[in-house]
Amino acid sequence: MLAAFLATGVLAYLTVLSVRMGRESMRDDAAPADVILVMGAAEYRGHPSPVLKRRLDHAVELYRQHLAPFVMTTGGAGGDPVFTEGGVSRSYLIDRGVPAESVIVEDEGGSTAHSLAAAGEIFRSMGLKSCIVVSDGYHVYRVKRILQLQGFAVYTSPREPPPSESESISAVRRAWLLFRQACAYSLWRVGLRF
């Protein structure tokens, strides 16, 4: 009986958190900051995946609006023996006109939590106190809260999905992505870092 009660409570908490994440996933509150932080996604033999490319293109737009003097890319190798998400992202940004000296790379992280811990260390070493997070909408709540708990001012600017993608993501799939992020964030809050 107690186990069922606890399970119901946890499920209710995760559902409420998923709804909050869903609301934030559609909010763009980009404002002037010290750095634009692009969360990594898959790369394929030195080329960004379509998801990563859209994140990077969005970051280029924000950079061209002069919202921050730096762009930080994140993400480790993910099993690739040659390339990292962060390194591939850096090359992509430079190819699109972002000066090399304006691109900061975090290329060790193998997960959101690890990338954000490393990014936080880099922020502190450079005296950076605020950032604009660029990622997919379902991801920004988690990233924002983790960075805020490290003491940074955080704005979010979720990348816009192309029409074909937004039409193809069903309500069930979107709910699952949000619920999964709620679970990952909750586990992070209780000390499980992955």
Image (cartoon, helix red, strand yellow):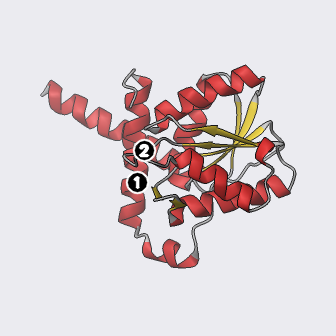
Identify residue for label 2: 181
Circle 2: element type: helix
Of the 4 image quadrants, the one containing the C terminus is top left
Q: CA distance from mark 1 to mark 2?
A: 6 Å
In the image, 44: left or right of 30?
A: left
Residue 109 appears at what percent x and percent y?
Answer: 48, 35
Identify residue for label 1: 177
Circle 1: element type: helix
Q: Residue 130 occupies which quadrant of the picture?
A: top right
In the image, 19: left or right of 15?
A: right
Determine which of the numbered discs, if any, sits on residue 53 in the image: none
Of the 4 image quadrants, the one containing the N terminus is top left
Q: For the point 39% across and 20% down, which residue is it?
A: 191
Amino acid type indicated by mark 2: Gln
Q: Residue furthest right?
A: 66
In the rendered view, would you say 65 is above or below 120?
Answer: below
Q: 134 and 184: which one is in front?
A: 134
